[in-house]
Image (cartoon, coloured by chain):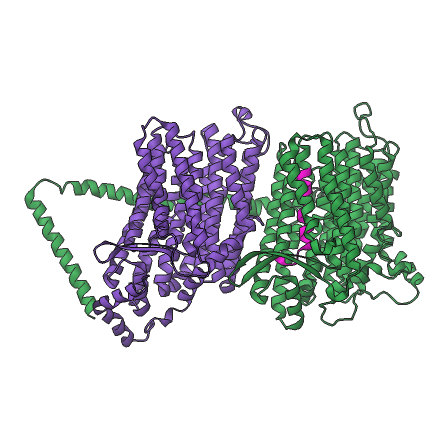
Chain colours: A green, B purple
Amino acid sequence: MPILDHLWIILALPLAGAATIGLLGKRWPQSAVNGVAVGSVALAFLTVVELAREFLQLAPDQIPFVGDYFTWIVAGSFRVDFALQVDQLTVVMLLMVSFVGMLIHIYSTGYMAQEGGYYRFFSYLNLFMFFMMTLVMAANLIVMLVGWEGVGLSSYLLIGFWFLKKSAADAGKKAFITTRIGDFGFTVGILLTFATFGSIDFGTLFNSVASNPVPEATLTTISILLFIGAVGKSAQLPLYVWLPDAMEGPTPVSALIHAATMVTAGVYMVARMNPFFSRAPIALLVVASVGAVTAFYSATIGLLQTDIKRVLAYSTVSQLGYMFLACGVGSYAAGIFHLMTHAFFKALLFLAAGSVIHAMGGEQDMMKMGGLRKKIPTTYWTMLIATLAIAGIPGFAGFFSKDEILEAAATGPHSNFLLWLLGVSGAALTSFYMFRLIFLTFFGAPRYDEHDVHVHESPRNMTIPLMVLAFFSIFGGWFAAPHLVGGTQYFQKFLEPVFQAYARQPMTAPLLEHPAGNPALGLLHAVTGWPVIVALLGLLLAWWMYIKNPHAPKRLAERLRPLYLLVFHKYYVDEIYAALIVRPLLWISTNVFWQGVDLGLIDGVVNGSARLARASGARLRQLQSGNTRSYASWVLVGVLGFTVLLLALYVRGAH
Amino acid sequence: MPEQPLLLTVVTFLPLLSVVALLLLRSDDHAWIRRIALAASLAEFVVSLLLLRGFDSTNAAYQFTEYHHWIGEAIHYHLGVDGISLFLVLLTTFLTPLAILCSWESIHENVKGFFVSLLVIETAMIGVFLSLDLFLFFVFWELTLIPMYFMIGMWGHENRIYAAIKFILYTMFGSILMLVAILWLYDLAGTFDLEGIEQYLAVTSLPHTTELLLFAAFFLAFAIKVPLFPLHTWLPDAHTEAPTAGSVILAGVMLKLGTYGILRFCVPLFPKAAQEAAPAIGVLALIGIVYGALVATVQTDLKRLVAYTSVSHLGFVVLGIFAFQVTAVEGAIYQMLNHGVSTGALFLAVGMLYDRRHTHEIKQFGGLATPMPVLMAFFLFVALSSLALPPLNGFIGEFLILIGTYLGHHAWASWAASGGVLSAIYLLWAYQRVAFGEITVERNRTLPDASIRERIILVSVSLAILFLGVASPLFTRRIEASVNNVVERINQPETASGGAGTGSMAAQATIAPAGIDRTTLRTLRVRGRP
């Protein structure tokens, strides 16, 4: 049975898993929950692999392959089909999502084993997989929106998984609402798209934008509106504030949803809508600038965080910024490349951090760790590999993808020196805060009470996913066969049709501008380039400050106290939002609208007229004196009045 | 030709007939009163489903019509159903059994009177949706008020008398204006029959002021019912004080009497006035959307909070209608159904909390997900449908309204879309304060989770929410023809003789037929009959 003809199966598997576990799983033993949850995702992964195999045999004119299942909404000229599509971008995303998802499901069976609500956790996790794969397989904007909102829902449920903790419930709500603010832009963008093109179907949209001239201003507006949605979902400035708080969720959730998959939905969407963005240079500049500034800005916050997960959270925000920078300079393939390598090494970082937290009995503060290297060697080595990858040390996955991005920012068709500089500076900071994390956690003397905390390596169902991800954190970049190592740019060539099919001038390949000369020279050039130099400097500085000279950080903090406090308190952004938006809005709603307008003004008028009626009733009651003559005179007044009224109407009617 | 010649009469009066059965029972025989009321409402639901069988979705005209002389020449017993009213009738017959079921244990006093009121309201509401004679319509319209007045005033909570009187006065104020307008129309057209009036208006162009005044009188009555900002302040009080069943019926169906009236009478009968008033009404609807949502956010009483969400959601419906665009109007009708189901469900859930704790104060709750996971899971599901999460029902209605509105009014739709952010804020914040965190009030620790009866209610509404979410074409395809008809009429108001502003010729032409044409009209009307 060819999967291509039954694309819905890929979605049905995790959905069925979520439904069965959610409805029946309460009474099941953990092993049964594991079986269904991991089984459904593993089957989905195998189905995706088979799908990829079939996809590779398709003729180019059969791509994108669309499966149209039923008409979901129809009203007037507006019609939405529940339609799924497969093209190169979808295949890459599906493989990544289902593979990483499967590993994290396995890891969770170990990490969550002692937790209450075990079935609930896996039901939500399966539900997330359903929505995430809906998002990447959608063939139109509305089905994409279903996945988009659905992953937001799963994220809400999973961040607030430990709902007894107020901070967890708060964080879930904050995540949902903040991303919804972005969705406001996304929604209006869809409205404008439909109003302009009369369709929300990707194929139709891209064909008509390629064949008919559409005013650039319209495309710019649409693109920026859609991008606002991406800013919310992918936690970019100024809507990134929910992601660090989202670390209240269980660590596997942070790894899967808030690092590897959901938060990259915004990047995926921008890449998907590339025919629009590529025709809107201003929008592209906005995308690139927001990305580059966010990449740098959140890296600075990461420098001073002491909670191991929060460092990783700000690092995620920063890395997402790089992906947007790539898209914004027109190098979508580099953005997707980084999206993929990031999924490997960042999922690994989170899972390893989870393993550290697990080993420390729940402790997340790095200041209370130290010297763990010997005690949890598997965790240490895998986490070190991921750190080398994210820091961009040559040979590891992150090096290739980050190099692509900075190369495109420096020399691509939309190159911009300032943005490149921000990117390179961010890379230096990244290397510094990541090695700071490694040194604080694994090196030096233990800063915890060794009698209280019994550090232990995690069970195999947790360490095996770590090792698999470590493998991909090294070689994930090599599979792409980058030009740098004499490869054929396999990854970029594979994605090329998605980003070239509707390009303005087909066949000019802005992505492939690596010098055609000797690959060895190119490699030498890249290895000695600025990104690598600053990464090594960051490493060295971290080593100097946290190993060689452990008192340096404190002295530096005292010398630069105002700056230190500003960054340490994350630039007070949460406080500013609360003071400028949240509190005024609540105050106005309570005091002006509710108490003032509703109870004061409107009800004042209503109750006032009621009182007036009662008062005049009391007055009028005196008229009912029982005096016949007084009644008669009132009848007369009434008749006269009525006559006048009729006359007036007659006169008006006669005209 | 209808195959079931009396179907509409049966659908309308079956609840009233079962009232007779209830009246025959001893008033302390509570068990049988409940059972018969429930059985009757379920039978009514099944019978109303027969409407779907013979309904022709390609036909924009009224179907299953019944037409008899009633009082004199001018007043008729005229019933009919079209795409606009079809699902509103089904909504009514769907929600009534749930309202009965949710009152099973919570109503102890004067049980008979309570269920009699509920069933009388059902007949009255269905009558409103099916009447094609303005006189008959008005009778049913007024008939909805009295039992609802009693429901709030007799079975309500602490401040019920104030709320009941506020409710009745607000509505009566609108009713009187509407009555004047109906009589005025009768004076012009010589009939109360809706189709007769439509035909009269098709050949005659009303003077501008007359049309505006008639429109305004009808609209005010309906706008109070909706309720449109700033005529909404009766609603929070009525909801807070009403018993659960009262709130379910009030929010679920009664508010839609207003939007239905706008769509059935205001807009198609007075298209020019509607066009002129649209900018102002659109702005009021937008204010309602944002204002209702903001005020809902800061409520401390759960029921009052849900009441304010109605102001916001019904603002969407009014906005959709006055966008005068097929997609938006269909979205508005769909949103009426969604709001009925979802807000009805919210009130049902809030009622279940009230049954346990006898309070609506949010502060009295907190951490309820621990003692009652099932009830809270359903509560969340309903909240998600209400905040328009795709693929649940609320999304479809809201999005159709937005997309249709956007085609004509970019700014309106953009403002309305911000309502989507706000609804997430008030619902999730309220949900968090009720369900999450540690238990703050010791009594809550031992509250029982949803009973079998409550689960039946919750599963029913949840299935409806899901079904409306994934199977919307089953509904919109039946709605579309009638909506097309209405929208065409609004967008071509100039086809009526003369048209506005062509000077004295037009004015003469408009005045002349008033006196002479009544007989002609009557023949016209009769020709239209089967």
For this view, does A183 lie left or right of residue A370?
A: left
B83 relative position to A518: left or right: left
Residue found farthest to the front: B3
Q: Residue at x 93, y 65 (%)?
A: A518
User: Quarter holding the N terminus of chain B?
Assistant: bottom left
Residue B287 visible? The answer is: no
Residue A139 falls inside the magenta stretch = yes
B291 and B130: which one is in front?
A: B130
**Rendered location of residue B473, percent (x, y):** 53, 55
Q: Judge whether B289 appears above or below A509 on screen.
A: above
Q: What secondary structure predominates along the stretch shown in magenta?
A: helix
Work out whether B445 lies above or below A492.
above
The percent position of residue A142, horizontal first and vertical second, equals 60, 56
- Residue B159 screen position, x and y as percent: 36, 34
Near-viewer residue (A484 or A34): A34
Magenta highlight range: A122-141
